[in-house]
Image: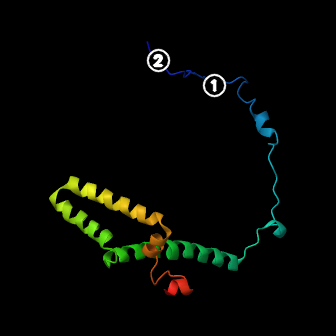
Amino acid sequence: VQYNAGEIRLRMKLRRVVPRGMDAFARALQPSCFTYATFVQEEYLPQLDLQELVDDAMDIKLQLLDDLIFAMLAFVSYIVAWKSFCLSGLLLATVVATFKSELLAWGIWHLWMGMVLVMLSDKKWRDVLSTNGLNAPLNQEGLE
């Protein structure tokens, strides 16, 4: 017994219903197709604004480079500069534990990631970790 999961087998055989030479009548008929204008109508073209294109490119640059990459760079520099002994020390312990036991390193790594997530949930810590001289706001708060 062969199960086909509800599929239907369909076998088709094409056969000619008119004698040879009769298909010339079908070729003589004018095919129905759309006719298109051969000229461009300028009122239907989209308005291309170079300044708007440059503004959109700058918005993308600001969101990607300034907001994302500089924040990640600030986070890495905060850890490398040992501004927080807990974060940097736990990451160093993860690296050292990797040589001792992979299982121990796996546990310390998750402890470190959990600590980072808890710290990033607080706005004060999030600002401290993700802001440095490259992406600080240009006001009194950014100068402090």
Q: In front here: 84 or 101? A: 84
Quadrant showing the N terminus: top left
Measured as percent of width and height from the top left, residue 8 is found at: 56, 21
Q: How crowded is mark 2: few (under 14 residues within 10 Å), some or many (20 or more)?
A: few
Quadrant hosting residue 31: top right
Name the residue carrying label 2.
Answer: 3
Q: Which residue lies furthest to the top in this view?
A: 1
Q: Which mark is residue 14?
A: 1
| Residue sticking out furthest to the left | 100
Q: Give the x, y percent position of residue 24.
A: 76, 35
User: What is the crowding at mark 1: few (fewer than 14 residues within 10 Å), some, or many (at least 20)?
Assistant: few
Q: Which of marks 2 and 1 is in front?
A: 2
Q: Where is residue 93 in the image (x, y as percent from the top left)?
A: 23, 65
Provide the secondary structure element on which disc 1 rests.
loop
At 41% from the left and 61% from the top, the residue drawn is: 117
Please give left or right for residue 10 compared with residue 134 in the image: right
Q: Which amino acid does label 1 sit on?
A: Leu
* Numbered-mark total: 2
Query: Disc 2 vs disc 1: Cβ atoms closer than 8 Å?
Result: no
Judged left or right of residue 23, residue 91 is left
